[in-house]
Image (cartoon, rainbow, N blue to C red):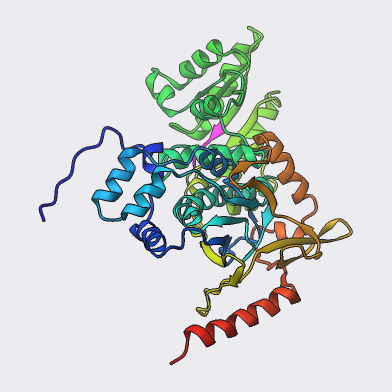
């Protein structure tokens, strides 16, 4: 067979790519089920994180908004269906199924921004066997990206304490879409991001116009002082300047000299940016020099491949840094880039017959039945969670109804409401789980009823399928 390829009009991932962006097996499985008369089987899928990633004591659930907005309008175009048919992935019954496709599942999920732990379903989908199956990669990918970024960014926000924290960047990141998710995740956990494309897309107000005289600006002028002065005069009382393009100490000296001239114009440089070297030593030096010359108002912002570990070390030394900025290390999830998001079948219903199902592979087990996650508190603080069956009374149930037979019944919060929700949970999470440099395992218990069902299901599987 001759291999051919064409150059697409765009490499950006678009809506036309979403519905087919999955393994071939997803479509052939649907063909198999439909050809075997299983289209009316009602099944339940659980989406969860199998184990906690390294260096994480908790995760923050992200991606629900993205999932809801796409599920509302999930349909297959003629072009998509024709491609599946031509490729041999869709039998005639699947072709007809996709032509009439309308999302009709029940969806329960944790509210976006919920703190969760290992093996806890964050999404539970119940509906026709093909409907849930067709969403496999979409759900896993939407949850992975948003959850990974929110769970990473919150760590730096914890490390800075009450100081200002900025993140969210499209530079040195895996894709443009990933950059947009990082910006959204930053807002969702009450950090700051100022990419105009993000602010326009999510209708977030952008900070008042200011300038950061970064390296390119400084190098474009004959001298550093001229660059500083030009920036401050175009954006009076709102200019920030980098001081380490050429020589750090001379940069500080030039800020002091320019500030003396700007004072006559009722103008001032409001902040310096340090992007290299010993951030502790340089911030101490800058603070002393500014205070010595009556420039206590000038704030210090630090970059330079920061992450939560470096920020924590600087804060332990009481570095006089007012604002921390993270980029590469955080936006690429450098310390722990893997979260094992899995999507597993838990129950199969054929008419009145209900069959709980589970995966028995050692180290990759999944639990049977329709489950709920229950949170328990002691003195208003998180104590332990219970993974149990639906309708048990084991604590505060975390999975809320989002879709009822395909109809959206949940009001989505905005980003600022999500950030308040995140903060309210952090306030009740025992302090040890906020640790950046130590790992603690939060207790997730199995209810006796679920334990009984697990054992019963194992025996049924062994009887029916594992006979030799």
Residue 208 screen position, x and y as percent: 61, 19
Residue 54 screen position, x and y as percent: 56, 64
In the rendered view, does 19 fall on the left or right side of 263? left
Magenta region includes residue 244: no
Residue 388's place in the image compared with 277, above or below, is: below
Residue 458's place in the image compared with 419, above or below, is: below
Residue 171's place in the image compared with 152, above or below, is: above
Q: Pick the quarter of the image with the C terminus.
A: bottom left
In the rendered view, does 66 fall on the left or right side of 172? right
Residue 445 in which image quadrant: bottom right
Tell me the magenta residue range. 273-277
Residue 203 screen position, x and y as percent: 58, 25
Residue at (61, 71) in percent of width and height = 368
- Residue 33 seen by the camera: yes
* Residue furthest top in the image: 265
Residue 392 screen position, x and y as percent: 78, 65
Q: Pick the quarter of the image with the N terminus.
A: bottom left
Which is the main secondary structure of the residues drawn in magenta? loop
Q: Which sits in the foreground, 398 or 106? A: 106
Residue 403's place in the image compared with 448, above or below, is: above
Residue at (65, 66) in percent of width and height = 439
Residue 450 in which image quadrant: bottom right
């Amino acid at each position: 067979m001759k291999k051919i390829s064409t150059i697409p009009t765009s490499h950006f991932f678009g809506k036309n790519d979403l519905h087919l962006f999955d393994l071939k097996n997803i479509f052939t499985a649907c063909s198999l089920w439909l050809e075997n008369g299983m289209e009316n089987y009602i099944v339940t899928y659980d989406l969860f994180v199998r184990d906690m990633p390294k260096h994480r004591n908790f995760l923050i659930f992200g991606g629900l908004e993205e999932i809801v907005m796409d599920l509302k309008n999930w349909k297959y175009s003629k072009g998509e269906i024709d491609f599946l048919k031509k490729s041999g992935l869709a039998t005639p019954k699947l072709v007809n199924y996709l032509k009439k496709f309308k999302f009709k599942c029940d969806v329960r999920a944790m509210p976006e921004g919920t703190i969760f732990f290992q093996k806890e379903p964050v999404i539970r989908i119940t509906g026709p066997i093909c409907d849930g199956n067709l969403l496999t990669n979409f759900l896993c990918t939407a949850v992975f990206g948003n959850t990974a970024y929110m769970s990473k960014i919150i760590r730096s926000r914890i490390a800075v304490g009450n100081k200002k924290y900025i993140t969210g960047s499209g530079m040195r990141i895996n894709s443009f879409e990933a950059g947009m998710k990082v910006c959204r995740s930053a807002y969702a956990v009450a950090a700051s991001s100022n990419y105009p494309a993000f602010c326009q897309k999510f209708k977030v107000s952008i900070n008042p116009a200011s300038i950061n005289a970064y390296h390119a600006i400084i190098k474009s002028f004959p001298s550093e002082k001229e660059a500083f002065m030009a920036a401050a005069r175009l954006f009076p009382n709102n200019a920030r300047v980098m001081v380490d393009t050429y020589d750090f100490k001379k940069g500080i000296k030039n800020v002091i000299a320019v500030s003396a001239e700007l004072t006559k114009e009722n103008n001032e440089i409001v902040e310096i940016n340090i992007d290299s070297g010993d951030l502790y030593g340089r911030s101490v030096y800058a603070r002393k020099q500014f205070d010595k010359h009556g420039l206590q108002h000038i704030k210090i912002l630090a970059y330079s491949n920061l992450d939560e570990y470096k920020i924590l070390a600087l804060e332990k030394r009481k570095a006089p840094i007012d604002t921390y900025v993270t980029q590469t290390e955080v936006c690429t999830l450098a310390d722990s880039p893997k979260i094992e998001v899995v999507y597993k079948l838990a129950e199969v219903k054929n008419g009145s017959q209900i069959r709980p199902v589970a995966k028995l592979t050692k180290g990759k087990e999944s639990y049977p039945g329709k489950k709920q996650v229950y949170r328990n508190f002691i003195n208003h603080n998180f104590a332990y969670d219970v993974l149990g069956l639906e309708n048990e009374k084991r604590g505060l149930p975390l999975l809320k109804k989002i879709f009822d037979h395909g109809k959206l019944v949940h009001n989505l919060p905005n980003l600022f409401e999500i950030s308040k929700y995140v903060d309210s949970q952090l306030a009740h999470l025992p302090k040890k789980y906020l640790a950046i440099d130590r790992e603690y395992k939060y207790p997730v218990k199995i209810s006796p009823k679920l334990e009984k069902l697990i054992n019963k299901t194992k025996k049924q599987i062994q009887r029916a399928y594992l006979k030799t």
